[in-house]
Amino acid sequence: MTYHTEKKDRVLAFFREKPDEAFPIEQVCRAILADGSGKSSVYRIVSGLVDEGILCKISEPNSRHCSYQYVGGEHCAEHLHLKCVGCGRLIHLDGRTSQTLEKQLLSSENFELDEGARLFGKCAVCRHKCKSLFAKSE
Ligand SMILES: [Zn+2]
Ligand SMILES: [Zn+2]
């Protein structure tokens, strides 16, 4: 049990270091498991963290593989987020961009966004994917 908890802490620390990046599960295993054994426990930990809302699952376009990204950051109440509906990626906006958007909406619409609110749309990768589909017919 303590061993499991320790491993969970390491998985969390791994994701927390780079909240703007998504990692395939194989890469998480390589980083966590020194000898490559115990992959199933890493799989269980990661899917548990997804259930807890600490990680999100991202489906990569043009691939059957999934990657995972940390979304439970301590500072996430202080900025806004862009959530891609195509792949599930979460983009953390910087504080200044967040404040500009928040102020703009408050003054033009008298609308106050929730702390850490998520705005939905399509990320660069997914938009590019759409474009390349259209490009075929040109
Ligand atoms: Zn955030
Ligand atoms: Zn996307």
Image (tube, helix red, strand yellow):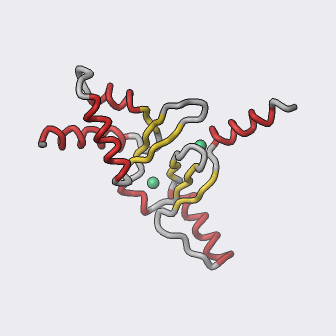
Q: Is residue 19 left or right of residue 126?
A: left
86 in relation to 40, above or below: below
Name of the residue lying farthest toward the left: 2
114 in relation to 62, above or below: below
Quarter of image, res 57? top left
- Ligand 1 quadrant in view: bottom left
11 in relation to 118, above or below: above
Name of the residue lying farthest toward the top: 35
Residue 87 lies, in percent from the top left, at 56, 43
The residue that appears at 39% across and 47% down in the rendered structure is 55
Residue sitting nearer the eye, 49 or 117: 49
Residue sitting nearer the eye, 102 or 42: 42
Q: Is residue 123 left or right of residue 46?
A: right
Residue sitting nearer the eye, 37 or 6: 37
The residue that appears at 51% across and 49% down in the rendered structure is 90
**Which corner quadrant holds the C terminus?**
top right
The residue that appears at 43% across and 40% down in the rendered structure is 68
**Which corner quadrant holds the N terminus?**
top left
The residue that appears at 33% across and 41% down in the rendered structure is 46
